[in-house]
Amino acid sequence: MAQIGTDIDAARAFLEAGQVVGIPTETVYGLAANALDPDAVLTIFQVKNRPAFDPLIVHTDSLDKAATLVTYFPDAARHLAEAFWPGPLTLLLPKHDRIPDLVTSGLSTVAVRVPNHPLTLSLLRSLTFPLAAPSANPFGYISPTTAQHVADQLGDRVPYILDGGPAQVGLESTIIGFDNDVPTVFRLGGMAVEQIERVIGPVQVRTHSTSNPQAPGMLSSHYAPRKPLTLLKPGQQPDLGELIGGLVFQKLLPGIPAERQRILSPSGDMTEAAKNLFAYLRALDTLDVVRLYAELLPNVGLGRAINDRLRRAAA
Ligand code: TXA
Ligand code: MG
């Protein structure tokens, strides 16, 4: 079973030996390995049971280091990095030859980000290589927001999980690319589109559900609990004829016992809702019910990313 702890030196030793380690970030926990070592990267795919066509994000601790992983850093990307790194934003940029093809699934771009977590930033500073890391969940399941979530599902397959407490953002990073210098969001996430637009002006959003894996992280079914999940528009009522659980935004649904419901944010705070989303979905998934219902949020700010995750979880 994985050891869970806060020992950066232990984590570093495993990573230097080519092994995979669970790491905390502000978004979700990652399953990290040396991004420059194809054998270590292959282990990530095996541990996660991830198809090789789904590329990984490369994590580093500074904009300067990120710049050594790519061949071109458009101005818009640089402005975003300066404004939001460390933070929940991933940039797709033309890949340097140093990055193994396995990391990018053969694509000509590499996804890079500087995560905002003190433990992981210290770890990255102490390493001579960047870390490739997908979310630390079995492929297709809900992303982990605590070290225990990682241990519950992958504990028998990794030697060490660095425990940085519950993830503060709770949604994966927003992914943005710059093909032909047109900023395009490919995955909604912890950085709201409105915030991005305040820095670089209007961006395209292209996150349509698809079964075509070329579109980044946009498989139509993903982030899914094991129980069937049905979405409710605001104000819509569930079918009370079966034993159900509910994930609601601000207040309990009538007709379902409180212990079978989770409230994302009683005060209607999207940031709080995002932080609770995955942990609550996991908790509901363990209940003795036949179906889960989840209420959609207003489609603004982080609500847009939360609704995106709920739609995929329900697909
Ligand atoms: O917040 C996050 O981004 C977390 C933490 C651990 O950093 N990581 C994460 O990784 O969510 P993952 O692997 O679960 O999702 C990364 C997504 C994948 O869906 C992948 O398709 C996309 O990023 N991606 C990675 N490299 C890409 C590339 N070169 N072009 C297009 N999409 C890419
Ligand atoms: Mg993932």
Image: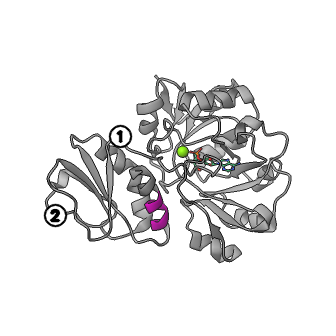
User: Which residue is at 46% across, 55% downward?
Assistant: 309
Q: Decide: is 181 above or below 172.
A: below
Q: Amino acid at mark 2?
A: Pro
Query: Predominant secondary structure in magenta?
Result: helix
Magenta residue check for 307: yes
Q: Position of residue 24 (x, y in %)?
A: 54, 44
Is residue 281 something one can see in this rendering?
Answer: yes
Along the horizontal axis of the image, is 292 left or right of 100?
left
Query: Which residue is labeled 1 in the image?
Result: 226
Along the horizontal axis of the image, is 88 left or right of 128?
left
Q: Is mark 2 within 8 Å of ligand 2?
A: no
Secondary structure beneath dot 1 equals loop
- Could you say which quadrant of the image residue 31 lies in? top right
| Closer to the camera in the image, 292 or 160 | 292
Secondary structure beneath dot 2 equals loop
Q: Position of residue 64 (x, y in %)?
A: 80, 54
Range of magenta residues = 303-308
Query: Which residue is labeled 2 in the image?
Result: 254
Q: Decide: is 103 above or below 70.
A: above
Number of numbered labels in the structure image: 2
| Closer to the camera in the image, 37 or 310 | 310
Along the horizontal axis of the image, is 71 left or right of 289?
right
Mark sitting earlier along the chain (1/2): 1
Q: Amino acid at mark 1?
A: Arg
Magenta residue check for 98: no
Mark closer to the observer (1, 2): 1
Label 1 to label 2: alpha-carbon separation: 24 Å
Q: How was the colour assigned to the protein in this rendering?
A: one colour
| Closer to the camera in the image, 13 or 290 | 290
